[in-house]
Amino acid sequence: MMSLNTVTSSFLDWWSAQDTETCLWPAFDLFVRETLLDIAGAKRVRLFHTAENGQVLRSLSQDARGASGAIAPTALMGHVLNLGRVYVQGDWSHGPMVDRLAAESAQQVLSSLQLPEPGSGRATQNPRPVLEQGPVAWMFPILSPASPEANGGAQGAGRHAVGLVVVGDLPETSLSDRSMLDGLSQLISAFWLHVRDYESLQIARRTDRGSGVLNRADFLSTGESATAEARREGEPIVVMAVAVEGLRRFDDLGQWTLRDRIILEAGRVLRRKLRNDDLVGRFSDDRFVVLLRWLDVGLGRLIAEKVIGWVREAVQTAVGGPAAGPGKENPGEIDSFESPSILAVDSVRVRCGLASNHRVARPRPETAEAALAEVEGLPVQRLTFADLLKRALAASGEARRLQQDLCVADEAPPARPSAAPSQPQPAQQAVLCGEGQP
């Protein structure tokens, strides 16, 4: 009991020392592993989030880097997650089936991630895969709270696994002390759910309610940090501005519900189609902004072309959604303007502007090396997030002016036939336009 009280005090101390503006999961992963080592002598400890209904497990230690660290659960893991039961090696209550699952999983369950030794004080920044084979000593799920409608039902009704803790080695004294193991698992579950609720609250505060993506302030803050990290590591990034033009006509026609649904569908498709490491935000009423990591301008252009298609499909989905047909909440709101709404949808255009900190530029009158080295006199490597965002937004505006789908900032525009030479405008000097449909 004294040890468990110490665990609670340690968690409160850990929580008060955290920077709540950053992702807490990697630090929580280290806290749990150090706690289990100190109290129970546990080694080879791994913590996972569940995803895709338990079909995928993601390491907490790499949570800040998105999808990395994902593994498929073994049969024993699936048993623990699906039934919500604790596994302890050698426990008489398991039965032969669970013992067989444990034996089958012994050679694969901890083919996991190289993590810093407890006591190092910080989580590793870039873990490498490493093979660790051997039996599992202890495994327990992290179960979500039961839903209100499940009250009075069977024990555990309405609950599902949101995480998993796997321990490879435990001393015999700890294996035989079920009261201590049960107490530890309950405390860690409570701590886990506390961190999860706080992270969910932070996400809700950062989310634009109309589109489900990051709001403007948090996108700017997160984008600045990501760009600074990319500059330090020499990482290529692309900033994209996506304009959904023609939405004001829906307001003029009294169809603001349909207009809002278009924005919601556009935000949803961007979140679903882009990678976890990419950032998506809503910059203004009809503009989304995206930061694509580990991509140069060539790949960024390919992604932008796909984004244009995705958002166009989202517009059609919004128009054909449930609220536009029979059984909608406000039946008269759209029907009375059915023909004008079709005209308004036809007037919607999606355009993209791109800017990159690393790009393959067209040779200018000067040397190709000089073209790569500078953008309006500023070295490429020193471009800030604000620089990239301004150029992407300007390129989006230039795409509209030239009736193109896509423009890339900071590169010379293609030659256009003209009856008489004219002085190029400043905005034109920094934009290369794609071959999209007007």
Image: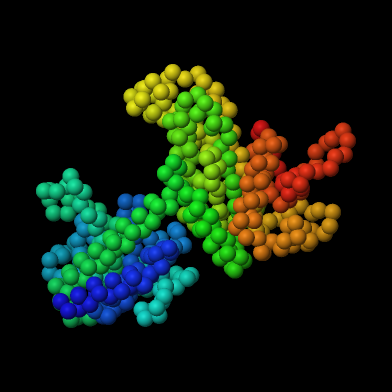
- Residue 425, visible in the rendered structure: yes
Q: Does residue 433 lie above or below 317 as drawn? A: below
Q: Residue at x 18, y 45 (%)?
A: 149
Query: In the rendered picture of this protein, how many numbered marks are placed on residues?
Result: 0
Q: Residue at x 47, y 49 (%)?
A: 215
Looking at the picture, tell me which residue is in the foreground, 20 or 126. 20
Which quadrant holds the N terminus? Answer: bottom left
Q: Is residue 430 left or right of residue 419?
A: left
Residue closest to the far right: 420
The residue at 64%/43% (across/down) is 396
Whether residue 212 sits left or right of residue 53 in the image: it is right
Q: Residue at x 14, y 73 (%)?
A: 179
- Residue 101 visible within the image: no
Where residue 168 sits: x, y (%)? 29, 73
Q: Is residue 27 above or below residue 290?
A: below
Residue 291 location, x and y as percent?
55, 53
Residue 384 in the image: state x and y as whole percent: 62, 60
